[in-house]
Amino acid sequence: MAFFTKDPIGVVEQALKQRGWKYHKPDPLAILTGVKSRRSHLILVRHDAERKTLLFLFAPTDRNDAPLHVHSSRGHSQEQIGGVSEILAHRNFTMLLGSFERDATDGELRYRIAIPYRDTNLSTQQAQWCIDIGIGSLDRMIPKIEDFLSGKLSLEEALELGEGRGPMEV
């Protein structure tokens, strides 16, 4: 079948070609690309052949197109860092696919989707779906985090308590 292959990285390449996106393969098990939607996002797709899993990592960028960090070394207060961590944890509680992460060592934020393919092959449609979910999730959350950090939103407003769900939330 044209849409299936035993090489998951090949499937991702095919999905990116269908979108007309440029990409780079730093090694045979990884693809690096990016997209500008509401903002720019870096996307790394890594194949873990041993675990038969494809990992999609989405890194939102700041206004200068550098990966977004929330950390004391970047001038953020402990209250801001704790608030962002709470916002991400709350959003993760409601997510159907993927999760937000914050690296405590440097404060880098990202969105991650892991797709296991134990007894089947990955399809380009699955790869496309993961890309769309990651971009949509970042486009929805990163402005809220930035508004919280700048003081435009309170923690309660950024948490969106009582608001409706997005398409990939339970």
Image (spheres, helix red, strand yellow):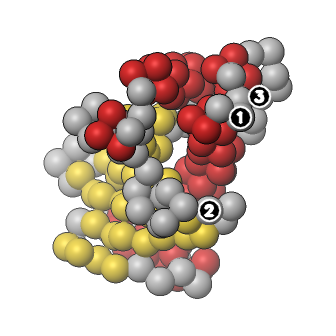
Image quadrant in which the C terminus is located: top right
For mark 2, give the secondary structure: loop
User: Does residue 161 appear left or right of residue 5 in this picture?
Assistant: right
Is 154 left, or right, of 77 in this rendering? Answer: right
Q: Earlier in the sequence, mark 1 or mark 3?
A: 1
Frontmost of labels 2 and 3 is: 2
Can residue 148 be spotted in the picture? yes
Q: Choose top left, top right, bottom left or bottom right for residue 156.
A: top right
**Cα separation between marks 1 and 3:** 22 Å
Cα separation, mark 2 vs mark 1, equals 19 Å
Q: Which amino acid does label 1 sit on?
A: Lys
Residue 61 at x, y percent in the picture: 48, 58
User: Secondary structure under badge 1?
Assistant: loop
Residue hosting label 1: 152
Q: Which residue is drawn at 49% across and 66% down?
A: 64
> To which residue does mark 2 refer?
39
Q: Name the residue under label 3.
A: 165
Whether residue 85 is visible to the viewer of this picture, yes or no, is: no
Amino acid carrying label 2: it is Arg
| Residue type indicated by callout 3 | Arg
